[in-house]
Structure formats: C-alpha cells, structure tokens
Amino acid sequence: MEHNIAVLYSRSIFQLSIDQRSRFNELIKLSKLLHDACTEGESLLPGMTNCLGDIWSAFYLLHPKFLAQASDIGALQYEFITTMMQTDDYTRWHQLTRGDELLSILTTLAIYEKLKEQKQSRSSFGQKSIKEQLKDMNMQQILSETTKRVKEQRQVIQMIGTADGKKMQQVTMTEQLTLAEQLQHNESLKKIAELTGRFKKIAQKKQKTKQRQTFARQNVTVGQEVARLLPIEMANFITPSSKLDFLRRYAEQQAFIFDTKGKDRRGRGPIILCMDESSSMTTIKEQSKAFCLALLMIARRQKRDFAMIPFASSIGDVQIFAKGKATTDDLIHLSTRFLGGGTNYEKPLRESLEILTRSEFKSADIIFVTDGSSFLPSAFIEEFNTIKKAKSFSCTAIVLTNVFNAVDLKVVNRFSDKVIEVNELFEADDVFAIT
C-alpha cells in the first residue's frame, strides 16, 4: 500500500549508499506503521525520521560504519545509537537482524515505541529533555524487552504468512508488513498463530501415522522395484532353494511388490470445512481459526481444493482456495472475521453441495464443526445423503459438547458418516487422519 509521504530519510550518521537510504524511504511507502511512526515522530522531534532510519540501518547493515563527522551531523541520534550499539543485546540481536528487512523494521518500531513512552512520561520533549533521557535510559533493558516483543511478532508473521505452504522467503515484504500492521490492531492473531502451531504438530503426527498404516495395507502387484519388494520375496532371494526362481521372476518383472497406487480414493477431492461461528463459539474463536489454518496446510500439501464455509444463522463469506493456495489477505480475512448469532445447519450443507457440483473431482471430505443444534427437514437430509452417495463424498462431524451445549446428535448422525464428540478441537485429532 502507498501513502502520501511528508517524511524522508535524508541525513545519516552512517556511511550509506544512495540505494541503502532510498530503500528505507521505499519501506516508509510500503509500511503504514513505519510511515505513521515517522510522521508522529517528526511532530515530537524534528529529524526523528533520520533517527529511525539510522536505527534501522544499525540493525540491517552487515557492518554499520559511522561517518567521520557523525557526531556533528546528528548529535542526539549519534549519542543514542552509539549507546545502543555498545550493548550485548545489540550484538546478539544484530546477528539475526542484519540483512533482514522485516526484523530490522520491527525492531526500529519497537524502539520507537519505547522512545515515545519516555516522551509521555515527561512534560516537555525539547532537546535538553532528550539528552537527559538518553543518559537515564537503560539501553540493555530497552533492547532486551524489544527483542522479546519482536521475536513474538516475527513468529506470528511467519506462521500466518506461510500457512498456505509458502516458505518465508516467498512471502513478499508487502505481505509481511501487512501482517505486522494487522498485529497492531488484532491481538488475537498472536494466539491464533500459537494455536496453529499446536494443531500443525498434531496434524503432522496423524498424517505420518496414516501413511504408515496406508503402506501396511497396500495391495500387491508385480514388478522389479527393489524398494517395494515384499518381505517374502527378500526371503526368497536369500534362501538357496528359492533364489533362482526369484531371480527368474525378477528378471521378467514378475516379483511381488507393494502397489503404491493402492485403492484409497482419499486425497483426490476437495476438503470442505463448515465451521460454526455462532455466538456460543466465541470462547474458542481463536482455536477454531487455528483449526481452519491447520486443515488449509494439509490441503496445500496434498494439492487439494479447500473451501471454508463459516456459518451461524446464515453463512458468511465463503472462501475457496484452489489447491490450498492463499494470499496474505485471504489468510487475514479467514483469521479475523467472525459471524456470531444463532445456528443453521442447512445453509452450510447446501453450500457444500453447490461447491461439489462445481468441482472437477467426484470425491470429497466435508468436515462439519458445531457446538449448537439446528432443525433439519427430513426431505433435505434425504437429498443430502442421496447426493453424497452419488458423488462419493464423506461427511465427518465434530461436535463440541459440554454442560452448556445442547447438540442434537440424532440430527447430526443422520447426515454424517462419522461423528467425533470432543470438549475442544485439540481432541479432534482423528480428523487429521481422515483427510
């Protein structure tokens, strides 16, 4: 995003190339947070943009070097930055931030917030008060607190930004800065990222178990691929009486091997997630969002279409991720919206059928998550089950039950192939083996 810029990094105490200084000005254009900090900073102290630019340079440059006349160019920022660079925390943190634009920006913004706190604790913010503050500042403590906060921010950006399978290097700077801005306005993103990490570990464990079980159930075919030979054929090879027969069959590609194609239809069709966002789900809102992201990661890995259908009294914005691919804006939208209201089963189930009629695949996995009850006409249930049989898709319901929820399991059982009752979504780990 671009902003009208009234600030410019024009004077530095470091030995910078024109391109290096220009890059910080480009980042001001890209990042609303950085632009706002520079604009606000100039109203507190003229030249604050230059100070923030030099803080960024101190962390970003591999080997920041001062100009010979640095102390004359900007006495205040020179005193502040030299004090900062003499701390052990700067030395350790610089090992991570050098060459990393995002970490350097987040660090600069975090330090600016500390400077602003200092200003707010004083009645005046003139040059003299700043000098006094610089002498009073515990730079070691400031950097220690700053690095902790920045690490948390980076973890959130990495988790959300790579939820669709991208590597961090593939997440553009604009996308990273957009996520950083969202973090300022939506604290729940941090919790969602933490919970997504937990779900991701559960999913990975279940997927590995599924792969081992699937391999154990593979059908047998014939061929000569050594890695797929049945144990009995290996025994034939080392047994003198059967070795010649084995070698003859092996040469003719008639040795018994595991058939990796198997007969399991799953993994070919879309994953359709109907997620209850009624008011009663508010207490586990972040957990439900993390659950969605974990399933999206599976879809991306398996190159399956993924549909997210939020529902309450009605359905919300339906998001379809082709082959599990998503933009940063998609992920932010998925993570930050929430409907609220009552519960209606029919609307999300009808939307699922609509998606299936548009899909090039015949099979699918519908995952229906709810903690509430809803009336479903018998005619619709019959229609749903008829289409389910014709389209060869399955429906797994995850029902959140506790003393406050009154889910009518009889209704859920009538349209579901499997019902998983849990107290929280972390207990629904079996769903990761179904997909």
Image: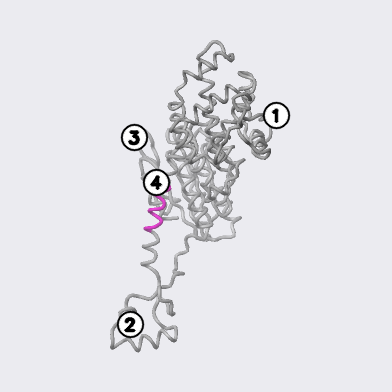
Image quadrant in which you'd find residue 57 = top right
In the rendered structure, the answer to whether residue 21 lies left or right of residue 226 reads: right
Q: Which residue is mark 2?
A: 237
Residue contact at pointers 1 and 4, CB within 8 angstroms? no
**Can you identify the residue that label 3 sits on?**
403
Q: Earlier in the sequence, mark 3 or mark 2?
A: 2
The colour style of the image is one colour
Q: Residues within 10 Å of mark 4 (few under 14, many from 20)?
A: few
What is the three-letter code of the residue carrying label 4? Lys
Say which label, 3 or 4, has the lower sequence index. Answer: 3
- Which kind of residue does numbered mark 2 sit on? Phe
Residue topped by disc 4: 410
Front position among marks 2 and 4: 2
Query: In front here: 251 or 394?
Result: 251
| 238 relative to 267, above or below | below
Residue at disc 1, secondary structure? loop
x and y percentages locating residue 417 in the rendered image = 42, 54
Which residue is painted at 53% across and 57% down in the image? 303
- Range drawn in magenta: 200-209
Closer to the camera in the image, 231 or 400: 231
SS of the residue at dot 2? helix
Q: Amino acid at mark 3?
A: Val
Q: From the image, give the main secondary structure of the stretch colored magenta.
A: helix
Tell me the distance, in whole angstroms, between the alpha carbons under discs 1 and 2. 76 Å
Which of marks 4 and 1 precedes in the sequence? 1
- The answer to whether any part of residue 273 appears in the image is yes
Disc 2 or 4, which lies upstream in sequence? 2
Question: Would you identify the image quadrant in which residue 1 lies?
Answer: top right
Residue 5: mark: 1
Relative horizontal placement of residue 182, taking residue 280 as reference (left or right): right
Using the image as rendered, state which of residue 388 and residue 425 is in the foreground.
425
